[in-house]
């Protein structure tokens, strides 16, 4: 595809159009907690449980959103001096969220509250009722036709819920719940300070950075340098930064928090986030960093093995291994998919003997839709258009692969890859600090408000040098119509020749080094070398 030339004024217009519906909201625009269906009912029941000294337990989830949701509730209950039991189900032993496997652990509690899960817990909800446990579900996922048996269900996607924003994460609902409790208990806790944690969950759970999501993230990132949470101080010290942006959260913090649940047990992430002093926080952070380093090593090895098994003729890649780590197959699917620019499913043999894994879509393919057409071959299946989880017996694998290719072809997807994040073809003469200042007005960038990318045609490579310990990164000097720009490209094994004329895809950033600020192109692709 050939992109049209674009000027700074046109860039500004395109970015403004992203916010045409809701505009730029602030915390003053946040809907009242009562807008969430059952919020008042749930609040009243929790207050009653607190006053009657009932035993209360929280059931979270093992991803960042679930870990942060659990942390928010735990820290709030600590602040008001009320004991709160909590459980993060283990991915490998317990499975996802509130399930029958969890009931023996909570049978002695009077009130159970879920965060970031529970909306599909039909069987477990019935078991709660049998054990006389009142159940309050807080979740943000798609609401099924059959609802679980619960005292109250807080989920913004319920049809009769008046909350005006559908795409929010579990931690936001947890934050709304503690805000409602704070008011009902007249606790006078600084609820705003919890937005530091909420902002991490919103970014990590890939929520659209528009409407109240953008307002909450911007507020959280501004509060982050002032946070008194030992865990946040430990992260800032380790990253040697005082100010973090959305990319820092997405690529530095979220993977570390996620690694505990992927490689061992997410409880370690909650214990880190709830650390009471900086000494404990730093020790616990080191454990998470070790999990993450292990995750990266395992992921790299499995990715290499998976790439060797790919059939390049397949429209949808499906690969399986014998002893691949279940906690990283989703990331591997994403990496393999990016290499081949195709939707990808990666499966591993589970302890039960069947195949279990994850899939990630690519481009316009709705992976959930085409996989659901073969649901009869699967033991378990769930997800959304871009990411799925599934299991199936080995005997059904070949038939599943064949049907998946047919399902893809039946959708008549276009093979031309159009990158919607590329705003247009930009001449180097427009790249200056005025353009950077204008781009900053539309931060924070992320899902549904992606950092603008540009393409420039006919760029000459004036110089290229290796960077990094193993030369895995490249630093360029480019020229275009008499203008010079420097650029960096990370994690590439490609070799480039000085003097070549190429097309580059990039976004524009500031480089801060030795108290000097310069413009730097963050290069995604070099085409035509």
Image: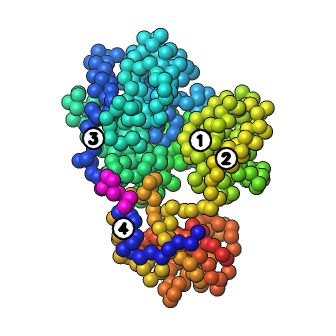
Q: Earlier in the sequence, mark 4 or mark 2?
A: 4
Displayed quadrant of residue 502: bottom right
For label 2, count other residues whose C-alpha is less than 10 Å away and answer few (under 14), some (14-19) or many (20+): few
Residue 140: x %, y % from top left: 43, 36
Residue 386 left/right relative to 76: right
Q: Nearer the viewer, residue 313 or 205?
A: 313
Displayed quadrant of residue 464: bottom right
Q: Nearer the viewer, mark 3 or mark 2?
A: 2
- Is residue 165 in view? yes
The magenta span reads: 17-24
Please identify the quadrant where the C terminus is shown: bottom right
Q: Nearer the viewer, residue 426 or 40?
A: 426
SS class, disc 3 = loop
Q: For the residues labelled 3 and 1, say whether their Cβ atoms are less than 8 Å apart.
A: no
Residue 68: x %, y % from top left: 43, 39
Residue 443: x %, y % from top left: 37, 60
Q: Earlier in the sequence, mark 3 or mark 1?
A: 3
Q: Earlier in the sequence, mark 3 or mark 4?
A: 4
SS class, disc 2 = helix
Residue beneath label 2, please?
410
Q: Nearer the viewer, mark 2 or mark 1?
A: 2
Per the rendering, the mark at residue 31 is 3
Image colouring: rainbow
Residue beneath label 4, please?
13
Distance (Cα) linking label 4 and label 2? 37 Å
Q: Nearer the viewer, mark 3 or mark 4?
A: 4
């Amino acid at each position: 595809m050939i992109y049209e030339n674009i000027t700074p004024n046109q860039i500004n217009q395109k970015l403004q159009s992203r916010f045409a519906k809701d505009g730029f909201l602030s915390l003053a625009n946040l809907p009242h907690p009562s807008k969430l269906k059952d919020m008042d009912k749930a609040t009243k029941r929790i207050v009653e449980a607190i006053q009657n000294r009932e035993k209360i337990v929280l059931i979270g989830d093992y991803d960042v959103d679930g870990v942060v949701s659990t942390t928010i509730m735990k820290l709030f209950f600590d602040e008001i001096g009320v004991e709160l039991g909590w459980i993060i189900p283990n991915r490998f032993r317990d499975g996802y969220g509130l399930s029958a496997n969890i009931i023996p652990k909570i049978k002695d509690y009077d009130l159970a509250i879920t965060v970031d899960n529970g909306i599909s817990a039909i069987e477990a909800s019935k078991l709660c009722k049998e054990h006389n446990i009142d159940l309050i579900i807080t979740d943000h996922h798609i609401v099924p036709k059959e609802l679980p048996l619960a005292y109250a269900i807080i989920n913004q996607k319920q049809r009769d819920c008046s909350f005006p924003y559908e795409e929010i994460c579990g931690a936001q609902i947890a934050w709304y719940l503690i805000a409602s409790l704070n008011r009902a208990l007249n606790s006078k806790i600084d609820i705003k300070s919890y937005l530091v944690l909420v902002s991490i969950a919103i970014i990590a759970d890939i929520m659209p950075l528009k409407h109240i999501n953008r307002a909450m993230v911007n507020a959280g990132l501004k509060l982050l340098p002032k946070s008194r949470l030992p865990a946040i101080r430990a992260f800032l010290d380790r990253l040697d930064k005082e100010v973090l942006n959305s990319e820092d959260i997405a690529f530095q913090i979220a993977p570390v928090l996620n690694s505990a649940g992927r490689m061992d047990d997410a409880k370690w992430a909650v214990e880190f986030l709830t650390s009471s002093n900086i000494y404990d926080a730093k020790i616990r952070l080191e454990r998470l960093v070790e999990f993450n380093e292990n995750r990266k090593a395992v992921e790299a090895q499995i990715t290499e093995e998976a790439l060797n098994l790919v059939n390049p003729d397949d429209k949808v890649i499906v690969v399986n291994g014998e002893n691949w780590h279940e906690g990283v197959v989703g990331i591997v699917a994403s990496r393999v998919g990016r290499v081949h620019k195709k939707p990808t499913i990666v499966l591993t043999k589970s302890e039960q003997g069947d195949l279990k894994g994850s899939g990630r879509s690519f481009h316009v393919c709705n992976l959930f839709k085409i996989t659901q057409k073969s649901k009869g071959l699967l033991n378990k299946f769930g997800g959304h258009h871009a990411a799925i989880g599934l299991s199936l017996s080995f005997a059904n694998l070949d038939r599943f692969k064949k049907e998946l290719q047919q399902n893809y072809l039946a959708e008549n997807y276009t093979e031309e890859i159009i990158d919607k994040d590329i705003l247009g073809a930009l001449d180097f003469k427009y790249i200056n600090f005025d353009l950077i200042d204008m781009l900053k007005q539309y931060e924070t960038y992320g899902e549904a408000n992606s950092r603008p990318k540009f393409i420039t045609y006919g760029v000459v490579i004036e110089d290229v040098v290796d960077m990094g310990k193993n030369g895995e990164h490249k630093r360029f000097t480019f020229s275009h119509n008499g203008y010079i720009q420097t650029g960096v490209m990370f994690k590439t094994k490609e070799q480039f020749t000085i003097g070549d004329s190429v097309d580059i895809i990039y976004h524009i950033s500031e480089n801060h080094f030795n108290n000097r600020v310069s413009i730097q192109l963050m290069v995604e692709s070099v085409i035509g070398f």
